[in-house]
């Protein structure tokens, strides 16, 4: 049974989904970046030419991932993590700025975005920590360690500042829940998000009145033994403080462009020539696609370059415009099929490390997928995160490839474990 | 339970996204319009308007280039130098603001007219600096270039479409030109051609990035077609010059075809007045001339009592109804007594047969004939209707159906008409006797009168008068080659024609004879009234003349109306003679003195006395 051939034991379904997504992604990038005079698809002056290079470049990475001993990921997880933290910290000295974010290194004509790779290292370390039999997430100090593992990179990334990438790490909380984190963390988290949004839409005082009513009803309907007036009061005070601070932060701390991003989300009047422009054009592109889209390479929004950065974070607008509702659904189904395949594979792992890592991969990919598309259709504030395997970019494509193929290797290796 | 959280969240998030996508892509179709707004702009290519030729293929109306400045409000930069633009184009700030506002109302993303019809100098100056004014564009159009100063009423004019037209007909866009009045209006689609449309794809900087969808929506411009009119340009010019200081109309037809040889109205105007930037100013001036009413085409629109020429029809109907024959005689004693002291005066006396009745223009003769016609059926309403239906077969009392703006119907009274006038009955032939001599209720337009003469010349049939002779690569309407036959049998025309010929031999036009041409004609004088200062006042009689020539194989039928010209042989008769000789011989060689007089004398003094506000006497 030992040392079965890798090609026999890898999950080909996942690899196939990966390949199809990469090819569809490339085709979309080609459409989004096609110059007026057609050149060779390998033209390295064009982003579609470079993307071919990135896709081909991922093949050696895949071979390496699948060939090396799976134990390395477990064994050297902390070293990878340490390196990632160093790279993130190093940005403040050696990093290059782009659009107000110091989030990448430039090596000649080549660039590297360390936050992409930090996701992998963080997933590995988190999996290693949680797979320790002594760790119990019901215990507060273990919870704190887990939060620290996730919080470290978030802190450094927020300082770049790159809210989008930081937000991705929050998805790892789902993994913690899967591995035993008490549910009230999630309830508190979702409540905070809910209150945050409410506080922006209606006046804080009304939010608090609403809170009093909801908590009061809960108190009156709760079982007598569970009625703890002090707990209810603490919750109310904490929530009120949160609401007021959101309101305060919005009014006094947020920069105008950040406020605009939130205003855009709520459909408040925003200058369509400035902050609202990108999102408006993105919606025009997607919305004008109709059932079947305008046809591949026929998108007028895409051809006319109305959506800025269309080949990176806004790539899904090309899908929506040229392939329509039908094409969008197909892409979405491909993506969630991959997610469910990963979750299915994770659940069949024999080691906690592999399972946890699988969940990390699923959670991270999901967060990218959701935040990216939801942002374009105004379900989420504008933050820059790439669409996995679709968006142009070497760092992100390779990072997603490594993230996924480590798991494929772990999965292929499960028969060798006991 | 813990296993399920992530899948549930994924499913919920996906459903949320799909629902939102469904709303954006399928339910809300406003994005498609916004996308189209982004995606392309439309450029029009204007074809040249067709030329207009006369019956001898002489060019009458050609084109000259004109340059309009168009503005697309969306594309105008916020920091456009308005002052410089205004200086360059000699406009003021208020004009700029007004045009921009109008353009925005029309469409922020479509070109609207900003300044029409630049002079060459302005065009050159602006052309040099156009790059500095984004959103402003020069469009070349063609304007009319007239080769003659006559025929304005026939040609009509072209003008910019107004909002009402744009809303009614989607072909026309702001700044487009459309033909109004005359052949420009009737043959608008033929002359205009079809403008070409190009959809040009734009990028976000509004740069053109090629044709939209490989040009599947594009159309190429179709050139306007040239048309040839039936008009004789020289005759038209001559006719207009004869109308010097006179008001009225001349209509000349070719009897064998119904072709309009000349259609003169006076006063007229130079068609070139309605071209170029002074168009609106000039148009307003023409429109405000409520005394001369130069925009009123009298040949088609003026309804006059026809006077004595109508006796031709009274005679023909009498013959057809067999109440008289060519040998019937009536005695005239300076008038006709039609009961209880009512008396119609006549300048004639003695015994007339049909022939002398016509050439003497004897009122008594035709009053008797008319009375016999109406009384033939016992009841006046039967008689009147029989009489009217003969007249209707000449195309009277209704639109003739020619290819010019439809003009007026004129009026042929029927029993129904009189029943409305006399609800209690009591009307009979003597009540309406004035109709016998073309007074009374009857009204005819000059073109109806000319067509009547053409019908007489043809001995009983006519083609609908028309102005179109040939359309380049097309055919003319069938109705112009369909014969209309009258209810009067052919043999009855011969004695009437002989009578009309004798008008020149022994009758009221004996001094108007033209050497070498056998003309048949009839003078006419019609009483008329106008309201002056609210009072119904009788004015000088209209001078009327109808004729055709030659007697055998007629080539021209003509009607001439000179308002307040007193009697037929005074103004209308000489003009008819001149027109006939001009058309048949190319020049009025035998009537030089008459021509000289008509060309330089008119009725200005007569017309001025009506507007002077002073009391005046008439007919002297």
Image: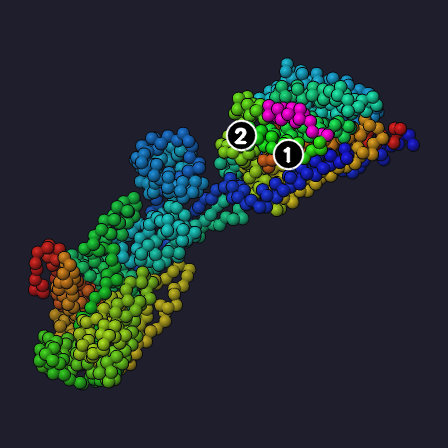
The residue shown at (34%, 30%) is B84
Q: Is residue B87 left or right of residue A274?
A: left
Disc 1 residue crowd, few under 14, some 14–19, many 20+, Cα 10 Å: few
Asked which secondary structure carries label 1, the reply is: helix
Q: Is residue B83 left or right of residue A338?
A: left
The residue shown at (43%, 46%) is B45
- Res. A358 in view: yes
Give the CA separation, mark 1 to mark 2.
Answer: 22 Å
Q: Nearer the viewer, residue A154 or A393?
A: A154
Q: Which quadrant is the N terminus of chain A positioned in?
A: top right
Dividing the picture into quadrants, the one containing residue A395 is top right
The residue shown at (21%, 60%) is B239
The figure's colour scheme reads rainbow
Q: Nearer the viewer, residue A191 or A99?
A: A191
Q: Is residue A141 left or right of residue B326?
A: right
Report the residue marked by disc 1.
Answer: A217
Q: Which quadrant is the C terminus of chain A positioned in?
A: top right
Asked which secondary structure carries label 2, the reply is: loop
The residue shown at (29%, 63%) is B407
Q: Provide the residue span drawn in magenta.
A: A225-241
Q: Which mark is residue A203?
A: 2
Dividing the picture into quadrants, the one containing residue B107 is top left
Which is closer to the viewer, label 1 or label 2? Answer: 1
- Point out residue B298 in the picture as x, y percentages from the top left corner: 23, 61
Q: Magenta span: helix, strand or loop, mainly?
A: helix
- Point out residue B197 in the picture as x, y percentages from the top left corner: 47, 47
Tell me which label, 1 or 2, sits earlier in the chain: 2
**Marked residue chain, label 1:** A
Residue that extends furthest to the right in the rendered view of this protein:
A1
């Amino acid at each position: 049974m030992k040392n079965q051939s890798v090609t026999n034991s890898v999950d080909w379904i996942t690899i196939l989904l990966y390949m199809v997504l990469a090819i569809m992604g490339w085709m979309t990038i080609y459409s989004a970046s096609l110059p007026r005079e057609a050149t060779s698809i390998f033209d390295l002056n064009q982003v579609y030419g470079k993307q071919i290079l990135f896709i081909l470049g991922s093949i050696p990475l895949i071979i390496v991932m699948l060939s090396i001993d799976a134990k390395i990921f477990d064994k050297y997880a902390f070293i990878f993590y340490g390196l990632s933290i160093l790279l993130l910290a190093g940005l403040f000295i050696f990093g290059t700025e782009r659009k107000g974010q110091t989030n990448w290194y430039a090596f000649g004509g080549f660039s590297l975005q360390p936050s992409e790779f930090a996701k992998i290292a963080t997933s590995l370390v988190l999996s290693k920590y949680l797979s320790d039999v002594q760790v119990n997430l019901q215990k507060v100090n273990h919870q704190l360690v887990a939060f620290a593992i996730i919080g470290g990179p978030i802190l450094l990334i927020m300082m770049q500042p790159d809210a989008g990438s930081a937000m991705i790490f929050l998805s790892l909380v789902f993994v913690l829940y899967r591995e035993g984190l008490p549910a009230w963390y999630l309830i508190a988290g979702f409540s905070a998000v809910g209150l945050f949004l409410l506080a922006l839409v209606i006046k804080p005082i009304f939010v608090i009145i609403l809170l009093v009513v909801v908590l009061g009803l809960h108190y009156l309907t709760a079982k007598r033994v569970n009625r703890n007036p002090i707990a209810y009061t603490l919750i109310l005070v904490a929530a009120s403080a949160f609401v007021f601070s959101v309101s305060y932060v919005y009014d006094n701390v947020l920069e105008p462009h950040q406020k605009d991003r939130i205003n855009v989300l709520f459909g408040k009047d925003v200058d369509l020539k400035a902050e609202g422009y990108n999102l408006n054009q993105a919606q025009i592109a997607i919305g004008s696609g109709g059932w079947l889209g305008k046809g591949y390479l026929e998108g007028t929004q895409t051809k006319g370059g109305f959506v800025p950065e269309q080949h990176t974070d806004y790539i899904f607008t090309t899908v929506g415009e040229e392939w329509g509702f039908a094409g969008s659904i197909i892409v979405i189904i491909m993506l969630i099929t991959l997610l469910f395949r990963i979750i299915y594979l994770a659940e069949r792992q024999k080691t906690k490390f592999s399972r946890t890592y699988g969940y990390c991969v699923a959670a991270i990919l999901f967060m990218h997928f959701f935040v990216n598309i939801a942002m374009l259709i105004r379900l989420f504030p504008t933050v820059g995160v790439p669409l996995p395997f679709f968006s142009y970019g070497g760092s992100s494509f390779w990072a997603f490839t490594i993230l996924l193929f480590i798991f494929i290797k772990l999965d292929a290796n499960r028969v060798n474990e006991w | 339970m813990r296993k399920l959280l992530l899948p549930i969240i994924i499913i919920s998030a996906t459903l949320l996204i799909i629902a939102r996508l469904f709303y954006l892509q399928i339910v809300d179709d406003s994005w498609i319009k916004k996308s189209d707004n982004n995606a392309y702009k439309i450029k029009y290519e204007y074809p040249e308007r067709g030329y207009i030729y006369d019956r001898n293929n002489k060019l009458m109306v050609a084109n000259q280039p004109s340059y309009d400045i168009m503005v697309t409000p969306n594309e105008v930069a916020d920091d456009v130098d308005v002052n410089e633009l205004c200086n360059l184009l000699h406009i003021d700030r208020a004009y700029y603001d007004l045009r921009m506002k109008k353009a925005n109302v029309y469409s922020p993303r479509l070109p609207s007219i900003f300044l029409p019809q630049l002079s060459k100098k302005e065009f050159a100056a602006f052309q040099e600096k156009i790059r500095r004014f984004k959103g402003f564009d020069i469009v070349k159009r063609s304007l009319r270039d007239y080769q003659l100063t006559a025929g304005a009423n026939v040609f009509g004019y072209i003008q910019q479409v107004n909002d009402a037209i744009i809303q009614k007909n989607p072909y026309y866009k702001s700044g487009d030109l459309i033909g109004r009045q005359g052949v420009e209006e009737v043959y608008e689609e033929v002359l205009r051609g079809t403008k070409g449309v190009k959809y040009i794809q734009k990028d976000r900087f509004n740069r053109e990035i090629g044709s939209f969808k490989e040009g599947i929506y594009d159309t190429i411009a179709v050139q306007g077609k040239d048309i040839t009119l039936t008009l004789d340009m020289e005759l038209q010019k001559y006719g207009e010059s004869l109308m010097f200081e006179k008001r009225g109309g001349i209509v000349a037809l070719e009897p064998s075809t119904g072709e309009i040889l000349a259609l003169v109205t006076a006063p007229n105007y130079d068609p070139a007045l309605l071209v170029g930037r002074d168009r609106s100013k000039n148009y307003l001036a023409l429109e405000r001339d409520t005394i001369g009413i130069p925009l009123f085409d009298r040949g088609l629109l003026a309804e006059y009592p026809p006077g004595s020429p109508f006796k031709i029809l009274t005679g023909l109907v009498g013959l057809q109804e067999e109440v008289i024959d060519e040998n019937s005689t009536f005695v005239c004693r300076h008038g006709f007594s039609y009961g209880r002291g009512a008396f119609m005066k006549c300048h004639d006396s003695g015994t007339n047969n049909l022939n002398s009745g016509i050439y003497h223009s004897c009122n008594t003769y035709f009053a008797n004939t008319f009375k016999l016609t109406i009384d033939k059926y016992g009841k006046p309403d039967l008689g009147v209707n029989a009489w009217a239906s003969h007249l209707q077969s000449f195309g009277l009392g209704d639109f003739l159906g020619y290819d010019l703006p439809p003009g007026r119907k004129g009026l042929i009274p029927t029993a129904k008409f009189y029943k409305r006038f006399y609800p209690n009955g009591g009307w009979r032939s003597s009540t309406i006797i004035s109709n016998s001599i073309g007074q009374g209720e009857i009204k005819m337009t000059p073109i109806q009168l000319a067509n009547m003469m053409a019908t007489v010349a043809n001995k009983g049939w006519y083609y609908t008068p028309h102005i179109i002779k040939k359309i380049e690569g097309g055919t003319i309407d069938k109705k112009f080659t369909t014969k209309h036959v009258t209810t009067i049998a052919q043999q009855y025309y011969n004695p009437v024609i002989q009578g009309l010929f004798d008008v020149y031999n022994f009758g009221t036009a004996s001094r108007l004879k033209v050497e070498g041409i056998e003309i048949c004609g009839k003078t006419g004088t019609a009483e008329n009234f106008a309201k002056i200062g609210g009072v119904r006042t009788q004015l000088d009689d209209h001078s009327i003349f109808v004729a055709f020539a030659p007697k055998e194989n007629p080539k021209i039928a003509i009607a001439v109306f000179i308002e307040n010209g007193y009697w037929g042989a005074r103004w209308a008769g000489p003009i008819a003679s001149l027109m006939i000789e001009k058309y048949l011989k190319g020049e009025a060689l035998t009537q030089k003195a008459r021509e000289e007089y008509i060309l330089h004398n008119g009725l200005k003094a007569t017309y001025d006395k009506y507007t002077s506000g002073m009391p005046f006497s008439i007919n002297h």
